[in-house]
Amino acid sequence: MRLKTLLAAGALSALAFAPGLAIAKTLVVGVPDNLTGLDPTNVNDTLSQTAMRTVYQGLFGFDRDMKLVPVLAESYEANPEATEFVIHLRKGVKFHDGTDFNANAVKVSLERLANPDNKLSRRSLISMLDRVDVVDDSTVKIVLKTPFGALINTLAHPAVVIMSPAALEKYGKDIARNPVGTGAFKFKRWAADTFEVEKNEHYWKPGWPKVDGVVMRSVPENGSRFAMLQAGEVQYVTLFPPELVPVAEKLPNIEVVKRPSIVGWYAAMNTTKKPFTDPRVRQALNYAVDKAAYCKVVENGYCTPLQSPMPELLGFFEPQKPYTFDVAKAKALLAEAGYPNGFETEIFALNNTNQIRAMQFLQQQLAQVGVKLTVTPLEAGVAAQRIWSVQKPEDATVQMQLTGWSSSTGDADWALRPLLWGKGFPPALFNVAYYKNDQVDADFEGALMTADPAKRGAFYADAQKRIWEDAPWIFLGASQLITAQSKALSGVYMLPDRGFVVETAEFK
């Protein structure tokens, strides 16, 4: 056995700008979309999981550079086959309902997530789990059905949280409206566009949190979020609009922060529906879109074109031969596939400013090759319903979807497999392109069967090459993450996967 010990590393903010007045005690965050639910094991968007990280915690997590850190765990041991993991737990931690965090809570939460009968959308993260054995109150042994070298990183995913067993027993499926965890904040209320938590007075980290609560307000329109920041109605704006950066940087009371990300943007094409059944059509659309122009027009230059199905900051990244902007080649491929005059199709995405702009950009680009693209912006819940209510691929109404994805485990497995595995069609996973390539599937499955980095890298290199050639997506760009905040605020930051941390928020 090898031991690996990880060392842990309301009032408006406008009042803070006025001399002699009290500093705000509640942090208000402006976000572009609505939350879709409060059970992190059963939601599919980073924003909802980020909100729930205020209430829930996992065994492990990530620091601001996506390096693994212990949270409710202190250390772990793994056997060489990567099938058994002994995890030593933090002592003296309590859930918000006053019950103890212990090994039984870990067993209940992980086995609940892995149980297929519960039909939780994030089950695939630990579907290889066989059982969790309680060794003693502060030690568990996780036993897997098959080797999985990425387990510890996967346990740091924001969906893999530890819930109060007492709350699970009390609320059952209604836990999705009554979250009870060990986090820095306790759940207070959730409405369609407002999520609110309050300070956990008995938090296990001494001295934290330093704010009385956090409110997340959904404001899809970019200019409105910025105006609210200027007015002091919010003190932190996440996914700040890139076109407003030059203006914000001139304001004395606002700080703009730019960070690299592992967020890749793409337009999925439903490969089971014509004309997207033909790879020549899909390749043609990649040649028809100027990726450098996408980064300039949609992201205001805070972006780099994708060079692979996954962003380059992730491990096992392998750059591919670019789809250069070539309208003539795109037209020739379309003609060869039987569409010399193009075709009509639809794309949908969320109804925030940036995604609408991206869809409109694609509409203009594809018009050059005769493709008439209908743009459909949808509220987050409606978009989720359109994808996740479908049980069989033939019933899917998706033609194209614009979206972004980040590997919140920091590992290549979660960057590719959920989106492009032939066994990952909704509602099982996120393969909205309904893409299937037997050799790619074998690569994904082979990489899961070994903890050897060299072997895993070879599998992922082959998968990236094949996916790139098959082109189930229009590969767009990896965006920088931009936030803006009151200069009176510190301790809030974005992670490279678009999540953000408010636990260490503090007003100066």
Image: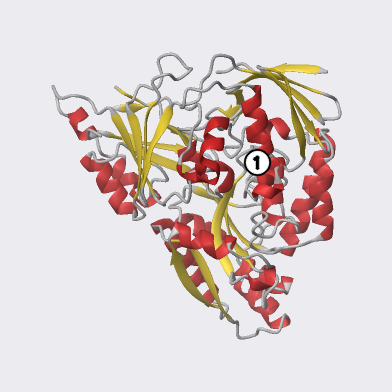
In this rendering, the answer to whether 259 lies above or below 302 is: above
Quadrant placement of the N terminus: top right
**Residue placed most toward the observer, 377 or 395:** 395
On screen, residue 490 versus residue 309, left or right, reads left
**Residue 152 spot, x, y in % from top left:** 69, 30
Is residue 65 visible to us here?
Answer: no
Residue sitting at x 34%, y 51% = 219
> Crowdedness of circle 1 by 10 Å Cα count: few (<14), some, many (20+)?
many
User: Residue shown at 53%/69% (left/top)?
Assistant: 347
Tell me where residue 456 appears, x and y as whole percent: 81, 40
Image quadrant for the C terminus? top left
Residue 92, image quadrant: top right
Q: From this viewpoint, is residue 145 visible? A: yes
Look at mark 1 in the image and give the residue it sits on: 113
**Extreme residue in the front direction:** 170
Direction from residue 80 to residue 134 in the image, left or right: left
Query: 470 or 142: which is nearer to us?
Result: 142
